[in-house]
Each structure stands twice: as structure tokens, then as C-alpha cells.
Amino acid sequence: MTTERSPIITPSAQQSRLLRDTLGQFATGVTVITTQDSEGQPAGMTVNSFNSVSLDPALVLWSIDKQSLGYEAFTTREHFAVHVLRADQQHVSNLFAGRGADKFGQVHWFEGPNGIPRLDECAAYFHCRRVQCIEGGDHTILLGEVLEFASPGGEPLLFHRGRYRALAGD
């Protein structure tokens, strides 16, 4: 039996969009990561690179583009919070993915441990201490130790092939 195979492609600058589209075949959850900037103001951004690393010790990671507006805040501040968004929080994802808006003026939040902004009503929450920044091409990978967490629950917001998605029924 003969099966058709996809061609193997070696990444190059000209093929970055094709690589991005191919990476988009991997469905991810959607999170908002928050911290404080150097002046104590809340900072946050939408991230889909969040992942677990270890249960003992409890470690998670995510990556940030070196050109991101919040790069300095996230790579220099000791603490950050990860908020796993619910399926009905697409507007929160869009808000924190954008630039220039008063993001925290448009959502319900409160000050969590270490002054880190904590968003209300997310599917899960992790308060972390940054333990390492790892250089990774045009991104920096942030490794965080989970200090506390909560799981209020709800269906997660998913992202696949450039669009928000819902879980399939049981």
C-alpha cells in the first residue's frame, strides 16, 4: 500500500510563515500571564506557550518574544501569575494580546501575593517565582516555581490553526 507523504521542509527566513502555520497544527490552551513592571504597575499578556515541566519540584514554563512590550517586566521581576482562560474568556485573550489599551481597566482583577495582578474567574491560576530565564532564539523561556495554585474549573479556551476552538463533546 502506498501512502502520500508530506514534503520535509527545512526552516528558513522565507518559510517562517509556513513554519508558523505548521506549528499551529498543535492545539494549545490560552493563558494570560501577569506581573508588575518596575514602577509597580500591572503588566499582562496573552500567551499560549505555557507548559508544565515538573511536579517535584512544581515547575512551569512559558516563552516571551524579545520584542514584546512587557519583556523587561517579565524577565526582571521575581514573580508572575499564569491564568488559564475559560472558553467564555476570548475577549480577555484578545484584550491582553493587543497593544496600548488599558487592559486592567477592562477586566476584574485584584492584587494577589507579592502584588501580582490576579484575574477573576479563570479556569486555573498559578502564582510563580521566576527561577530561570533561558535564551531561545528570538524568545526567552521563563521557568517558574509554582508557589500556589487554584483550579476553579470550567471549559478551557483553546487555540488551533489561528482560531479559537472549543472542546469536542464527550
Image: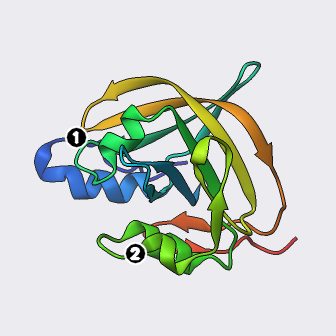
Which of pointers 1 and 2 lies earlier in the amino acid sequence? 1
Residue neighbourhood size for the residue with mark 2, other residues' Cα within 10 Å, grouped as few (<14), some (14–19), many (≥20): few
Q: Residue furthest left?
A: 14
Residue at 41 percent across and 41 percent down: it is 74
- Return the x and y of residue 125 as percentages of the image width and height: 71, 52
- Return the x and y of residue 118 as percentages of the image width and height: 64, 57
Amino acid found under the numbered disc labelled 2: Asp
Q: Based on the displayed image, in which of its 4 quarters is residue 43 positioned?
A: bottom left
For label 1, the residue is 11
For label 2, the residue is 102
Q: Nearer the viewer, residue 86 or 110?
A: 110
Residue at 57 percent across and 76 percent down: it is 107
Residue at 41 percent across and 25 percent down: it is 133
Q: Is residue 11 above or below residue 16?
A: above
Q: Is residue 117 above or below residue 98?
A: above
Q: Nearer the viewer, residue 82 or 51?
A: 82
Disc 1 or disc 2, which is closer to the eye? 2
